[in-house]
Amino acid sequence: MPKRNRLTLFILLSMVLGIGVGYFIFSGTSPEFRASFSKNIKLLSTVFIRLVQMIIAPLVFSTLVVGIAKLGDLKTVGRVGGKALLWFVTASLASLLIGMALVNALEPGKFINLAKTDTAGLQDLMNKKQSFSVQNFVEHVIPRSVFEAMATNEILQLVVFSIFFGVAAAAIGDPVKPVIKALDALSHIILKMVNYVMNFAPLGVFGAIAAVVATNGGEIFRFYIVYFLYFLLGIAILWTVLLGVGFVILKQRLPLLLKRIGSPMLIAFSTTSSEAVFPKLTEELERFGCKDKIVAFVLPLGYSFNLDGSMMYMTFASLAIAQAYGVHLPLATQLTMLLVLMLTSKGIAGVPRASLVVVLATCAMFNIPPEGVALILPIDHFCDMFRTATNVLGNALATTAVSKWEHSLGEPIEPVATV
């Protein structure tokens, strides 16, 4: 069995084991023992959460700087880059708004009440919560020191520094290519670390699920069914919007594009990795009629800046966790979170479960209990399959749209028949 499939199997088995152990504790022990057990077993999820937190800063910095530096001379590529960024920003906002609207309308997180697992801790968290103000927002945006931002995982401050660093590197050009190459290698090292850290996911899942079930009993089970179905509804809405815009731009050629990218989307769906299909997607877009120069520029940029499915999920997951823990977020705070995700989502890569890194950082920034990330991890693999396929669709549409706007969309190139 492939390693990724084994990990998924272990996560599912850990979920089942956590449910069994937690339900046994809930039904056969005293409330005092349940509270003690939940507190101790939750340490497993704490270990996993802290392992994820340790890679947030280098992951965001390295991937975001490399993505911006690939723009090259901003004056030379300004026109094409501007059109691409216009699509990316618009699609990102649409994705985030769909996730936010869906969670507020359907409230999937309220199917469980996690606040009672640690009432005192939640009250302490709310007491420490700072009220939103312009001063607090500016302090969260502008870093005093990049090292302080890295040490404290102030993700938005790190994004600001990375943007300045990446733009400066692109402006200097050739002399900084060794630095960008080194950061590119660093990003690959960090992504490899992500795979290592995910090996601890079964322990985190077991600890989180066992603690919750031991405290809440069987009512926890309803959450995953509702959460997944509501997420699929959001994906369906997002696909409708993307395909609608794609039809306006491509007209009758849209079905051919979907046929071309069908195979890459299936691979991405089954492996939960959009990076795994990058070479194949490049080939299919060029066969569709996109100029190789446009594909070579827009598609890599899209992999850093245009992850529509992931962004919709990050809003959906963050707000659902807040609802589950009874953390009320006013509309102004939710819009602020949307803008934060708009920036932080540009620093993630198309690898399995990378979205959870940003969800974790966002939860911490808005005082949402981070252990909620471990809670949704059992269903995340299935959500990841759909959001990864959506990422591939969004990047294919972005590349073809820019090609159309640049009058660089030629006739389809059929593969050469072999005897």
Image (cartoon, rainbow, N blue to C red):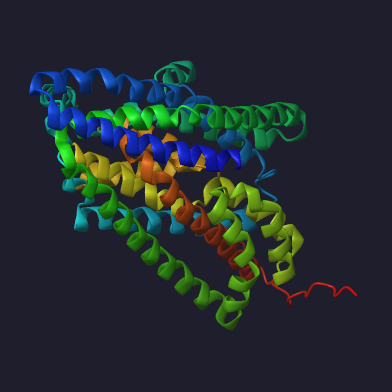
Left or right for 46, reference 170: left
Q: How many labels does the image show?
A: 0
User: Where in the figure is residue 290, as x and y percent of width and height?
Assistant: 70, 67
| Residue 418 percent coordinates (x, y) | 88, 73
Provide residue 67's location: percent of width, then percent of height: 61, 41
Picture quadrant where residue 351 is located = top right
Q: Quadrant of the N terminus?
A: top right
Q: Is residue 119 above or below residue 356?
A: above
Q: Where is residue 19 in the image (x, y as percent from the top left)?
A: 27, 36
Q: Which residue lies furthest to the left in this view?
A: 31
Displayed quadrant of residue 180: top right
Q: Residue 368 vs residue 309: left or right?
A: left
Q: Which residue is drawn at 50% across and 29% down?
A: 199
Question: In this orientation, which residue lies closer to the viewer: 249 or 319?
Answer: 319
Q: Can the viewer see residue 243 in this picture?
A: yes
Question: Which residue is at the front of the view, 125 or 89?
Answer: 125
Front residue of this view, candidates 263 and 205: 205
* Residue most extreme to the bottom: 252
The residue positioned farthest toward the right in the image shown: 419
**Rendered residue at 58%/67% (across/down):** 401
Q: Which residue is drawn at 61% across and 69% down?
A: 405
Q: Can residue 326 be seen in this view?
A: no
Where 349 falls versus 44 (above or below)?
below
